[in-house]
Amino acid sequence: MDIYSDDPGLASTVSERFCAPDADLIIRSSDGILFKVHRQNLAAHSEAFFSASLISSTSTDESGPTEAATSKGISQEDIVEFTEDSKTLDLLLQFMYRQRQPNITNLKYSQLMALAEAAEKYEVYAAMGTCVAVFESKFIDSNSLGIFKFARKHGYPNLVDKTAPRVLHRSEDLQKSALVDLRLRWHTYFDRCVPIVWKEFIDLLDSSPCSCRSWPKTETLILRVVGGKPHALMNRACLDDKSLQTTPACCTKALANIRTALKKKLLADATLPTFSSINDDYSF
Ligand SMILES: [Zn+2]
């Protein structure tokens, strides 16, 4: 339903889930959905969210927004604008009410990231932990770089250490980071990892050859493609290099197996140094 539609610019729809008649605060999402909520719940579950709602309140009533809301009903002045979209707020608010937590395991990565960033911003602890768990269980391989940056920004060292080997092939992206501290630490981490990756790669190349007669020629091609950047094998696209397209199918399969084994080895504990072990003594 539309309310406050006297001004077309303010016409909004009320959330079906958060529409309590005894609500004492209305939040408007960035896409214009209104959430009628209870200040008590916000205050109990997220001090930061509650504070944001007070700071953002446009009420001009000297008696304050709470008194104004309870004595006269909620006025338009009690609508608080939030920068998060309605999907994000709908999920985040569910973590602030006494009810089952929402199932967020089916969210798309972008939706989960929006929720996770909002949970960090407003310190909604229940949502924070759940988001991190889903990042790790569902997206750690498909969205390693984004999760690495998120984990580092918000202080999740275990998640940083799990994602760092998975983004070795994205080194150039990380070197462009605006964060000098991240660039320096990454530089040190990368320099320590590459010789280890190279050794593991050569060991696998020697121990798992294709048995066909073309293998020596294929091996030369592989070394030419992968040679200076063995970490590129963390990305499957590396096998699509043009110069490898003429190799026999048996050799292509052998290389794919080597890549899989290398990735498994590099992601195993203790093969590579952990990113969080890189301290401020940057070595150049
Ligand atoms: Zn072969």
Image (tube, rainbow, N blue to C red):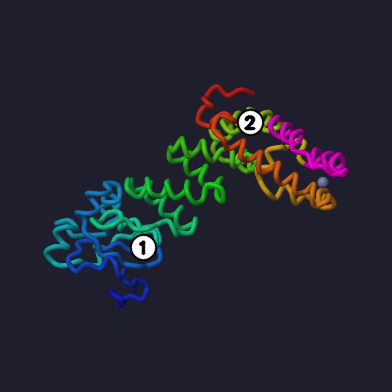
Q: Look at the numbered disc 2 and say if its residue's Cβ is closer than 8 Å to ligand 1.
A: no
Separation (CA) of disc 2 from disc 1: 44 Å
Which of disc 1 and disc 2 is earlier in sequence?
Answer: 1
| Residue picked out by circle 2 | 193
Instruction: Between residue 134 and residue 192, name the one nearer to us.
Output: 134
Instruction: Between residue 211 and residue 253, name the one nearer to us.
Output: 211
> In front: mark 2 or mark 1?
2
Looking at the image, do the residues carrying marks 2 and 1 touch, with CB atoms under 8 Å apart?
Answer: no
The disc placed on residue 57 is none
Name the quadrant of the C terminus. Answer: top right
Q: Quadrant of residue 59?
A: bottom left
SS class of the residue under badge 2? Answer: helix
Region rendered in magenta:
199-225
Asked whether, in this view, residue 10 is left or right of residue 189, the answer is: left
SS class of the residue under badge 1? Answer: loop
Q: Position of residue 155 (x, y in %)?
A: 43, 37
Name the quadrant of the N terminus. Answer: bottom left
Q: Residue at x 63, y 32 (%)?
A: 190
Q: Residue at x 56, y 51 (%)?
A: 142
Instruction: Between residue 240 and residue 282, name the one nearer to us.
Output: 240
Q: Position of residue 274 (x, y in %)?
A: 54, 30
